[in-house]
Amino acid sequence: MPTPPSSSSPSIDLLALAQTDVTTPLPTASLHAALARPPFLFLPDTFNTRDLGLLPGSPIRPGLVYRSGGFLTGLSAEGKDALAGGRVKIKKIFDLRSVREHEQRPDPDDIGGGVEVVWVRPEEEDARVGLEDFVEGEGEGGYVKMYLDVLKVYRAAVMKVLEHVRDGRGEEGFLFHCTAGRDRTGVVAGLLLSLAGASKETVALDYMLSRIGTEPAREQLIAFALEGSMAENVDAPGFHNLCNLRISCWEAFVRAVESQYGGFEGYVTGTLGFSEGDLAKIRANLVLQN
């Protein structure tokens, strides 16, 4: 994992950098400049770690909701101290990985500092995608299918996250992650931001920032995508679209959520079974309007 970037890094257009094609490595100076500023957060042994409350335009209180890539299985003593020692005041971590991912690299038994790790068995044995769905256009069809599957397959974990927000008072930080901290994590982040009242531009920016946050692990994640899609090589039809992040794909997913569920709020109330009162508490606790 990279060393902490300098806080004196120059200003940079985050969205422009995030739109860099995945086949092009991000320039080192630009990458360090981006990772040195909010909403990115340096924690040992992690990548793509961000505070959703520090995202430009976010209505969420800073220090409450964090997202990250899958780091727990390789967490060092320094990393545990950073989490449990109060640097970010995280008290609960939600693991959004598949059964096979979890079995291959289990969560640690004890992080310390009262930090609790929650993994709920999803309706998915392994994280697999069909490349044929990503061939047309910019892969919008594949992303819609994959992200709608996240809302279905990982709904038990999503419920746990929302229950945690509802039953708390925004006083203790929590973090959620998958393997890359990009897709499953991105769907949950988009859900929380939307429930909190973030603009569609703000939600899309958070989604795109994973292109920057995953850069330190780019080669490993391409290998993970090759395995998960069973592609023969990086030139397989649809693989390039699968690996890239594009606003058009996120917007296609949002439209699908509107069509199928009546939006994220409709998903939370109609599918997950939360009441309108629950929804109001979740929103209030995210933005601390108690």
Image: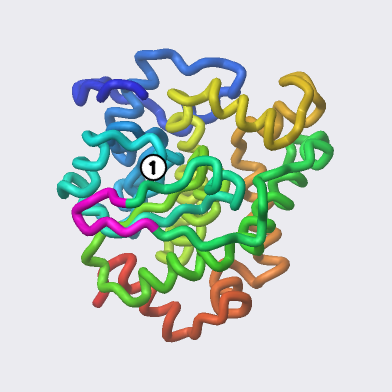
Residue at (54%, 49%) from the top-left corner?
Answer: 97
Is residue 170 inside the magenta stretch? no
Q: Nearer the viewer, residue 64 or 157?
A: 157
**Helix, strand or loop at disc 1?**
helix
- Type of residue at label 1? Leu
Q: In the drawing, does residue 288 fall left or right of residue 177?
A: left
Above or below residue 147? Residue 247 is above
Which segment is the magenta one? 110-117
Give residue 104's position: percent from left, percent from top: 55, 41
**What residue would you read off at disc 1?**
72
User: Residue drawn 28% across and 36% down?
Assistant: 43
Provide residue 274's location: percent of width, then percent of height. 51, 81
Q: Main secondary structure of the magenta part?
A: loop
Q: Quadrant of residue 246?
A: top right
Is disc 1 surrounded by few (<14), some (14 to 19) or many (20+) residues within 10 Å? Answer: many
Which quadrant does the N terminus fall into?
Answer: top left
**Point 32% across, 23% down: residue:** 33
Q: Position of residue 32 (x, y in %)?
A: 33, 21
Residue 263: x and y in percent read 61, 68
Quarter of the rendering occupied by the C terminus: bottom left
Q: Is residue 112 left or right of residue 74?
A: left
User: Which residue is rendered at x = 41% and y = 73% of the image?
Assistant: 163
Q: Quadrant of residue 166?
A: bottom left
Above or below 208: residue 67: below
